[in-house]
Image (cartoon, grey):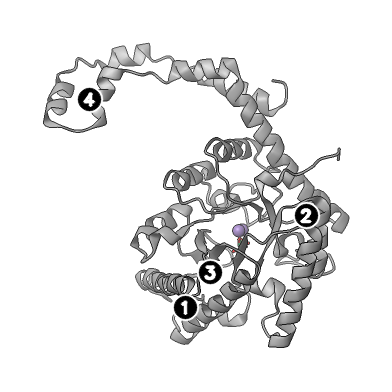
Amino acid sequence: MAAFKPDPKYKFTFGLWTVGNPGGDPFGGPVREKISPVEIANLLGEVGAYGVNFHDNDLVPIDATAAERDQIVRDFQKALRNNGLKVPMATTNLFSAPVFKDGAFTSNNAKVRAYAIQKTMRAMELGAEFGAKIYVFWGGREGVESDATKNPVDAIKRFREAIDFLCEWNIQQKFGYKFAFEAKPNEPRGHIYFAVTGSYLSLIPTLKYPDMCGVNPEVAHEHMAGLNFVHQVAAALEQKKLFHIDLNDQEFGRYDQDFRFGSANLKHAFFLVKLLEDYGYNGPRHFDSHAYRQSDYEDVKEFARGSMRTYQLLAEKAARWNADKEIQGLLKEINVEDAALEKLTKKFSAANAKKLLAEPLNHDELHKANYLPYEKLDQLTMEIIMGVR
Ligand code: GCO
Ligand code: MN
Ligand code: MN
């Protein structure tokens, strides 16, 4: 790959669990040797990433003693300094340990729910030691295989209760976290609660501290459900709730693939990058993906470099699209303005309603005058993406 420097302005981050993924799947064990958090930091330093994120147990094993924990923290802090890496986001593993077999905050067992909150409190402390300011909540096992087993209304109430409690803990401890909720429709559960980003956007206004809470949408999670990810991100952006984003890729409707960003659906990736850049998203761009099972660690570096490079190339293409005179001309033509009518429909009043009803708007005339060369516009877009424009 030609010389390439990731631009720190994009805040490209990777999780310890992503570049450190040893390549196991439900049908076969790991194919790469497990490497330590310090080695992962060195790898990320080498490829020029901005930062690294972790679950509590990616860094500190669940049964580590206090002394072991402190040593691990010191070693990792040193590795971060050596590699110039930041930790913008932290999160809790509430899905791997057998205790979470039926969920964490939504478990039917009050003792498990309390343990999940306690584990998150400790994990928030750990993240804070590294300066993390975004705290992600992904409800990996918050769900069911059968609705005979849990009450879905109670599940929402339990989840809300846990979050309200942890928001207070955030305030009391002065961590300064923003919470970012990550939706996923299924895997590892048959049905995961809060299946799409919009589910969380509707929960947030019902929380005790809605301003503290936003979302962390992931490309693959919406694509697994066959949905348009760009529209979900637009909804979050429009509500000023896009606190973090998980970039990867995924064939529609397949198992959870976690492919390299842009590798499966380039056109969607283009519109996503364009949206993020057009609306000045300035949070971290986190690659929540992993290299193919066939890769060794040299190839894992190519995976990491490729993720960042694809983003930057698409950002360049988006700028080119915005600067393209023909495209801009078409946009002007298809967006028909009418100051007098818009004045009427902008704000309801009895007088405006009366005037609107009196307008001689004829559907057939409107249709005939509405020129929409969308094939042309889309082909011009494709030619920008394909690099011939
Ligand atoms: C997945 C999820 C996770 C989360 C991570 C941070 O499908 O496995 O995307 O990778 O993003 O647990 O919360
Ligand atoms: Mn995922
Ligand atoms: Mn994710």
Q: Say which label, 3 or 2, has the lower sequence index.
A: 3
Q: Is residue 317 above or below residue 210?
A: above
SS for callout 2: loop
Q: Which residue is mark 4?
A: 344
Relative to residue 303, is residue 10 drawn left or right?
A: left
| Residue at mark 3: C-beta within 8 A of ligand 1 | no
- Within-10-Å neighbours for mark 4: few <14, some 14–19, many 20+: some
Q: Name the residue located 54 percent from the left edge and 75 percent from the top edge.
A: 120
Marks 1/4: CA distance? 52 Å
Tell me whether circle 2 and circle 4 mark residues in contact (CB < 8 Å). Answer: no
Q: Which residue is mark 2?
A: 292
Marks 3/4: CA distance? 48 Å
Q: Say which label, 2 or 4, has the lower sequence index.
A: 2
On the image, the x and y values in percent for residue 340 come to 26, 18
**Is any part of residue 100 visible from this angle?**
yes
Query: Which label belongs to residue 107?
Result: 1
